[in-house]
Amino acid sequence: MSRLAPVPDDTPWLDPDERGAWVALVRTMLRLPATLDTQLQREAGVTFFEYLVIAMLSETDDRTLQMSELADLTAASLSRLSHVVSRMESRGLVRRERIPGTGRRTAATLTDEGLALIAGAAPDHVVHVRSLVVDAVDRDDLAAVRRVAERISERIDDERSGPTR
Amino acid sequence: MSRLAPVPDDTPWLDPDERGAWVALVRTMLRLPATLDTQLQREAGVTFFEYLVIAMLSETDDRTLQMSELADLTAASLSRLSHVVSRMESRGLVRRERIPGTGRRTAATLTDEGLALIAGAAPDHVVHVRSLVVDAVDRDDLAAVRRVAERISERIDDERSGPTR
DNA sequence: CAGGTGATGTTGATGTGTCAACAACGGTAC
DNA sequence: GTACCGTTGTTGACACATCAACATCACCTG
């Protein structure tokens, strides 16, 4: 990220502060998911992403979401979600059913086993999240995290809808 | 992440602000790497992680780093790095060589092709990083990002050295 | 109502990451 | 100097993600 071309260079390279922030962010972005995966895999035998899927379902009234809604909520492609839900279905954590008269829509429903799994795993997970993130920074910084994260997400949205679509 | 157990519950659930920040962070953490991958893959035919490897090497005097140092700098396991560098080596981007008289240490060196690749890709990549992150938030928030990211990284370090090691 | 189009999912091939086992080397203790 | 031990790295088997192709259905348009 530092200067590379020797002479004619109109690239807006990052200054030291900007670079420091970016490097720190990249580092954390690379490590945090792995850490969450490890803990959840050990405690509950699920990936962080699978946990997310279950969590999203568990927070609805009927434990059910349409596949595409679920993909949205978990920031995943429909393809990834479909593969993952297939595996989870074969493990008995969720159930899938076509919704008649609505095109190809499919409902994914959390089973009792799935609900039991998250009920068991959630407390430890929350503690973990607090120890790594929420309790590790003060309230102002946590507010900043939210602002920044939402802003970045917007930019990513813009990028996907702007150029080609 | 909301309440799940109906009665006896000493789990320190997240309050709405905390939850909002965490959800936003997770969402961004899941999407940002994919976005960077896509852009770099299109522009330069490399993964973000491969780009990182090349970038780290390009910033040393002799374009060379020991495998374990490189693993540190890119926050990867030695195993992952070894696989990735193998592929990069077969594409002619890096070269590997054992360092004699130093145990099993191996030096990875960036080739001219690798250097050319990053010289070509870096400008667009920097613009991308600015548009998604650095220029998208104000300086105070960027400082907060750095503080928070470094804090989280420390916590992850602690976790790895504390319990078992 | 025939044909096209967009929305929603699934599938299979291929690439990449992870985990555990192994390999190679330098040191240290005795 | 021999037997361990820690460090450093590689490998192979398996799990998972991605990408492109396909499938299915509702709806629109003439």
Image (tube, coloured by chain):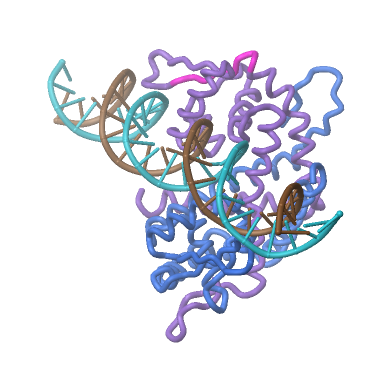
Chain colours: A purple, B blue, C cyan, D brown
- Residue D22 located left or right of residue B143: left
Relative image position of residue A162 (x, y in whole percent): 41, 53
Out of A131 and D16, give the one closest to the viewer.
Answer: D16
User: What is the total number of numbered labels drawn onto the structure image?
Assistant: 0
Identify whether A52 is placed above or below B32: above
Relative image position of residue D18 (x, y in whole percent): 43, 43
Query: Farthest bottom residue?
Result: A7
Name which residue lies at 39% across and 70% down: B113
Name which residue lies at 69% across and 43% down: B22
Q: Which residues are magenta?
A: A106-113
Out of A6 and A153, give the one closest to the viewer.
Answer: A6
Is A10 colored magenta in this rendering? no
Relative image position of residue B31 (x, y in whole percent): 54, 47
Relative image position of residue D17 (x, y in whole percent): 49, 40
- Asked if one can make out residue A142 in the rendered structure from this viewpoint, the answer is no
- Asked if one can make out residue B163 in the rendered structure from this viewpoint, the answer is yes
Which quarter of the rendering shows the N terminus of chain A?
bottom right
Identify whether B31 is placed above or below B40: above
- Residue C2 located left or right of residue B30: left
